Structure formats: structure tokens, C-alpha cells
Image (cartoon, rainbow, N blue to C red):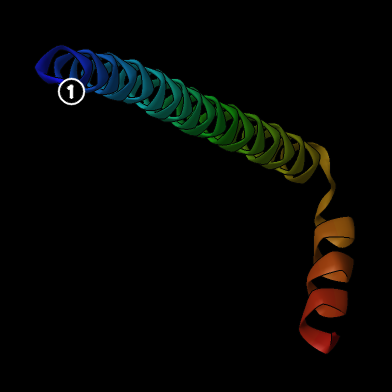
Amino acid sequence: MIRVVTALLAGLGQRAAFCGAIAFALLSALWIAFRQGRHAAEAELSIRRAEARIRAMQTSQEIRHEVQNADRAGLKRRADRWMRD
């Protein structure tokens, strides 16, 4: 009788260890996937911000170039239109 109970408890301990290892592996995989997803999202956001900053700088440069090359009458006309709107 003692041998049967010992065999059952030993098998139960191995099953519990196996289930615990599977649960740990699953949780580890989920945590790694979550971290990689978060890092990928942060990288994508920083790339989008950098591209927006570049577009803003290019637009500013184009406007500055137009203003420097425009004649006085054209600047006055644009200023009047801007103040009216």
C-alpha cells in the first residue's frame, strides 16, 4: 500500500513540475512577445516623429526661400491676403 501511495505522489510531483514548466515557458514567451512589440512600436513612433520633423524643416526652408526671392509687391500682396484671412 505504501508503495502505491508513494508511486502516485511521485507521479503527481512530476506532473506538477511538468505543468509548472509549461506554464513558465508560456508566460515567458508572452512576456518576450509583449516587450518586442512595445520596442517595435517605440521605434516606429520615433521614425514617424523624425520624418515629420524633416518635412517641417523642408517646408520651412521652401517658404524662407520663396520669401527671400519674392519682390516687395508680391510680399505685400501675400501679407494683405494673410491678414484678410
Q: Is residue 34 left or right of residue 72?
A: left
- Residue topped by disc 1: 5
Compared with 67, 23 (above or below) is above
Q: Residues within 10 Å of mark 1 (few under 14, many from 20)?
A: few
Residue visible at 37% across and 24% down?
19
Quarter containing the N terminus: top left
Q: Quadrant of residue 53?
A: top right
Quadrant in which the C terminus is drawn: bottom right
Asked where in the image residue 28 lies, by quadrant, the reply is top left
Q: Is residue 24 above or below residue 74?
A: above
- Residue under the image location 18 percent in, 23 percent down: 5
Three-letter residue code for mark 1: Val
Where's residue 67, x and y in %?
75, 46
Q: Nearer the viewer, residue 3 or 70?
A: 3
Would you say 27 lies left or right of 41 here? left
The residue that appears at 57% across and 37% down in the rendered structure is 49
- Name the outermost residue toward the left: 2
Q: Secondary structure at mark 1?
A: helix
Q: Nearer the viewer, residue 9 or 56?
A: 9
Q: Is residue 71 above or below residue 10?
A: below
Front in this rendered view, residue 47 or 84:
47
